[in-house]
Amino acid sequence: MLALLFSNLTSFAAFNTGNACDPNKTAQHAFFGFPHWWKYVNKGEYDGLGHCLPKVNFPSGIWGVALAVVDMMLYVAGIVAVVSIIIAGISYVTAAGSSDKITSARKRIVNSLVGLAIVIVASATVSFIGNAIG
């Protein structure tokens, strides 16, 4: 009877302190789609309340955090590129036949698309390196 009671008590998360966990599997949804700063940190520990918290080992674990921060900045750069494409499209439509405005809008669209392509390639590279490290 005592063994049954003890086995039920140890199933609570609060008694799992010190055990390893993966914070990426137990994480809540990201804020506006931004990746978490611990995206490439695959090791964590349970706290006293049973929540899995990321554990970063210094100095080797700082690379995973740095890659996640770069990933966040690339996410922002992608959003800026898409907004720039939208603004350039609106200025292209409202150019009213002015060749200078049309040329300027086309250049902005092309530059924004090139920037978006660079962001996509850089994000894929960071993700590949981060998954290889983590």
Image (spheres, rainbow, N blue to C red):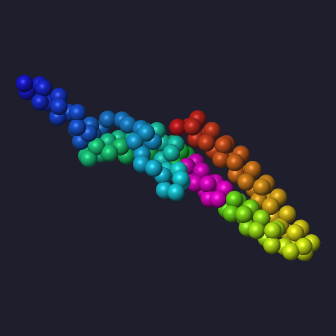
Q: Residue at x 52, y 37 (%)?
A: 134
- Where residue 76 sits, quadrant-wise, is bottom right
Q: Quadrant of the N terminus?
A: top left
Residue 22: x %, y % from top left: 41, 38
Dominant secondary-structure state across the stretch colored magenta: helix
What is the span of residues highlighted in magenta in the rendered image? 67-79
Instruction: Name the residue: 80% across, 61% down.
Output: 109
84 or 64: nearer the eye?
A: 84
Specify whether 96 is left or right of 51: right
Residue 110 placed where, x, y %?
82, 58
What is the tally of numbered marks visible in this picture? 0
Name which residue lies at 32% across and 42% down.
Answer: 46
Image: 100 above or below 114: below
Q: Is residue 32 left or right of residue 126?
A: left
| Residue 29 lies within the magenta run | no
Instruction: Give the camera-side residue of 86 and 120.
Output: 86
Residue 59 visible, this angle:
no
User: Residue 41: x percent and y percent?
Assistant: 48, 42
Q: Quadrant of residue 80?
A: bottom right
Q: Residue at x 23, y 37 (%)?
A: 12
